[in-house]
C-alpha cells in the first residue's frame, strides 16, 4: 500500500544514511521501525493502579470544606513542614 508521510528533513537525512549503511531501502528501514514500535506496544501491559483504598468514612467533617492550603497545613502539622 502506498502512503505519504511528512518527515522532518534532518530525520529523513539520518534515516537515508542509516539505510544506506545497513544496505536497506528507506522503505525497509521505516517498516522495520514501525514493526519494532508495534511489537513493543503489544508486549507492554497497560498501567493499572492497584487498589489501595482504606476502610474509612471519607474526609472528616472539619476537612470537607477546607481549602487546599488548609488541608496541606493539617497534613504537615507537627512535622516541620510549612
Image (tube, rainbow, N blue to C red):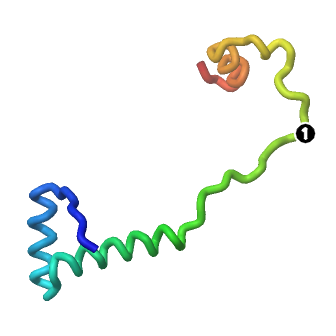
Q: Nearer the viewer, residue 68 or 25?
A: 25
Extreme-bottom residue of the structure: 23
Q: Quadrant of residue 15?
A: bottom left
| Residue drawn at the location 71% of the way across and 24% of the way down | 75
Q: Nearer the viewer, residue 49 or 15?
A: 15
| Residue drawn at the location 24% of the way across and 71% of the way down | 2
Extreme-front residue of the structure: 1
Q: Nearer the viewer, residue 25 or 51?
A: 25
Task: Give residue 36's position: percent from left, percent from top.
Answer: 38, 75
Quarter placement of the C terminus:
top right
Task: Give residue 26's position: percent from left, percent from top.
Answer: 16, 76
Task: Give residue 14's position: percent from left, percent from top.
Answer: 12, 68
| Residue drawn at the location 53% of the way across and 73% of the way down | 43
59 up-or-down from 70: above or below: below
Quarter placement of the N terminus:
bottom left
Question: Please, what secondary structure does the residue beneath circle 1 have?
Answer: loop
Residue 22 in the figure: left or right of residue 69: left
Residue 55 in the figure: left or right of residue 20: right
Residue 64 in the figure: left or right of residue 30: right
Please state the total of marks drawn on the protein image: 1
Residue 36 in the figure: left or right of residue 49: left
| Residue drawn at the location 82% of the way across and 23% of the way down | 59
Is disc 1 surrounded by few (<14), some (14 to 19) or many (20+) residues within 10 Å? few
Find disc 1 in the rendering and name its residue. 55
9 up-or-down from 39: above or below: above
Q: Quadrant of residue 29?
A: bottom left
Amino acid at each position: 500500500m502506498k502512503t505519504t508521510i511528512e518527515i522532518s528533513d534532518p530525520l529523513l537525512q539520518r534515516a537515508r544514511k542509516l539505510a544506506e549503511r545497513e544496505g536497506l531501502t528507506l522503505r525497509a528501514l521505516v517498516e522495520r521501525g514501525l514493526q519494532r514500535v508495534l511489537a513493543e506496544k503489544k508486549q507492554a501491559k497497560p498501567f493499572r493502579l492497584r487498589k489501595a483504598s482504606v476502610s474509612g468514612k471519607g474526609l472528616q467533617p472539619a476537612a470537607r470544606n477546607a481549602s487546599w492550603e488548609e488541608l496541606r497545613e493539617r497534613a504537615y502539622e507537627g512535622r516541620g513542614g510549612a
